[in-house]
Amino acid sequence: MLRGFATLTFWAADLEAATAWYTEFLGVEPYYRKPGYAEFRLGDYQHEFGLIDSRYAPPGATDRPAGAVMHWHVDDLDATFERLLSMGAKEYQPITHQGDGEGFVTASVVDPFGNVLGIMRNPHYLAVLGE
């Protein structure tokens, strides 16, 4: 059974450039590095976010943005979205209010390395965090 988010990984043809870009965006250095890999710990639960040199990717995995979109909760969705765009990310999905006005808002970008990064304002996340 699924127990919770453990590690999210993105591919990057230029691992050093991707690591520098995410270090600037996140405001933290990777806590773990080895050849071909860099990993950050993020957020309230110290989730793992890794960058892997795309030469280790399965065939076709880096041809275009694809797959599921993992949305990270952020406190200020508009400001985070604008910051990502100002850093060279491209809009993938615009800021979208979901549901019946309950406060769920999503957006996503394609980072300069071809990965889809989702962001979200999620009242459920805040409720769980507050428990």
Image (cartoon, rainbow, N blue to C red):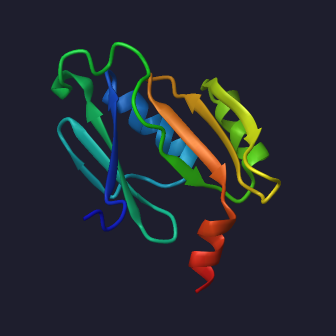
Q: State left or right for residue 122 relative to residue 56.
A: right
Q: What residue is drawn where x is 25% and y is 65%? A: 1
Q: Nearer the viewer, residue 39 or 123?
A: 123
- Is 103 placed left or right of 106 in the picture? right
Residue pictured at 19% horizontal, 22% vertical = 55
Q: Position of residue 90 (x, y in %)?
A: 62, 22
**Residue drawn at x 40%, y 62% as measured from the top left:** 47
Q: Residue furthest bottom?
A: 131
In the rendered image, residue 130, in percent from the top left (x then y), is placed at: 62, 82
Left of 11 or right of it: where is 23? right
Residue sitting at the far right: 101
Q: Nearer the viewer, residue 97 or 22?
A: 97
Inspect this view and state whether residue 82 appears.
no
Measured from the top left, where is residue 125 in percent x and y? 60, 67
Location of residue 43 in the rendering, given as x and y in whole percent from the top left corner: 51, 64
Asked whether residue 94 is in view, the answer is: yes
Q: State the image quarter where residue 73 is shown.
A: bottom right
Residue 37 sits above or below residue 109 on the image: below
Position above or below: 58 against 78? above
Up/down of 84 relative to 122, above or below: above
The C terminus sits in image quarter: bottom right
Q: Is residue 90 left or right of residue 78?
A: left
